[in-house]
Amino acid sequence: MSIGESSTPLGKVRGLGSAREGGEHWLTERVTSIALLLLGSWFIASLLFLPKLDQATLVEWLHAPSGAIPMALLVIVGFKHGLDGLKVVVDDYVHEPGTNFVINTLLLFLAVAGAAIALYALAMLAFGVAA
Amino acid sequence: MAATRPRPLSPHLTIWRWGPHMVVSILHRATGAALSIAGLAILTWWLTALSRGADAYATFEKASHHPVGLIILIGLTWSFFQHLLSGIRHLVTDTGAAFELGVNRTFAMLTIVGSIVLTALLWIWFLGYVK
């Protein structure tokens, strides 16, 4: 891990900065934000265009691939973007490395668990016999 | 490796004069945190309730039609639009554009006006629906 004379500029800065990382994280946040711009607009537009907002209509909407697939993407990208954003907040305010690691790991577990629960519900809606 | 003396801190909220850019920056973080925690939790609850039949969905509907539930949902809708518009502003400034004081200030104010208008329009439409 020593930084020798042969290190490239990237090799020299890698691991530095308050968060010890960041370039990929920063870019991922931007890319997922553009995806959420599209998926979020789709979500609002879908609610506006549905004939009713009762359970039967919503279940039918998410049973069809045209509803289930974008919703699955919204869940996955939404949890990823939310986790990335909260990490920035945690890294800004929690400086002690041990506490920082614990909180970020806890948030990671919560995000993965939340996404799994939401995707399971979506799978039930998409593959289940229409309720 | 632990710091032996406190790190110098830059002057914070108490010392700067408030302006639209500062408000929007703080709101971006606050609305992002609200969407990541409450927004994703409610989205997951909503999908789970939809997948689990009439009783589960009735519980969700009862909570969402309660005044407190409505305030939370309207607050999250506003958070969504504020974060979305402010996010677009961030993508623009990421390219190095719109840093002129006047332009930056105008964009910041437009995100606030835009998020309130979009939230109002959507909820006028929603509440007309629910009745």
Image: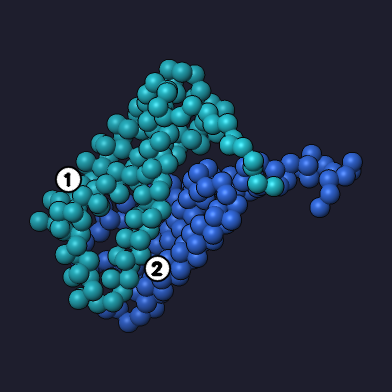
Chain colours: A blue, B cyan
The residue that appears at 48% across and 35% down in the rendered structure is B90
Look at mark 1 in the image and give the residue it sits on: B124
Picture quarter containing residue B9? Answer: top right
Q: Chain of mark 2?
A: A
Whether residue A88 is visible to the viewer of this picture, yes or no, is no
Report the side of A34 relative to A12 (left or right): left
Label 1: state its secondary structure: helix
Rendered position, A25 above or below B87: below
* Picture coordinates of residue A1, whole percent (x, y): 81, 52
Instruction: Please give the count of numbered marks on the rendered protein.
Output: 2
* Picture coordinates of residue A48, whole percent (x, y): 26, 52
* Picture coordinates of residue B106, whole percent (x, y): 38, 23
The residue that appears at 19% across and 62% down in the rendered structure is B63
- Residue type at tag 2: Ala
Q: Residue furthest left?
A: B131
Foreground tag (2 vs 1): 2
* Picture coordinates of residue A4, whole percent (x, y): 88, 44
Q: Which mark is residue A118?
A: 2
Q: Are marks 2 and 1 on the same chain?
A: no
Q: Residue furthest front?
A: B4
Rendered position, A57 above or below B16: below
Report the side of A9 relative to B116 (left or right): right
Picture quarter containing residue A128? Answer: bottom left
The residue that appears at 51% across and 36% down in the rendered structure is B91
Mark 1: give few (<14), some (14-19) or many (20+) Cα within 10 Å. Answer: few
Q: Which mark is residue A38?
A: none
Label 2: state its secondary structure: helix
- Residue type at tag 1: Ile
Q: Chain of mark 1?
A: B
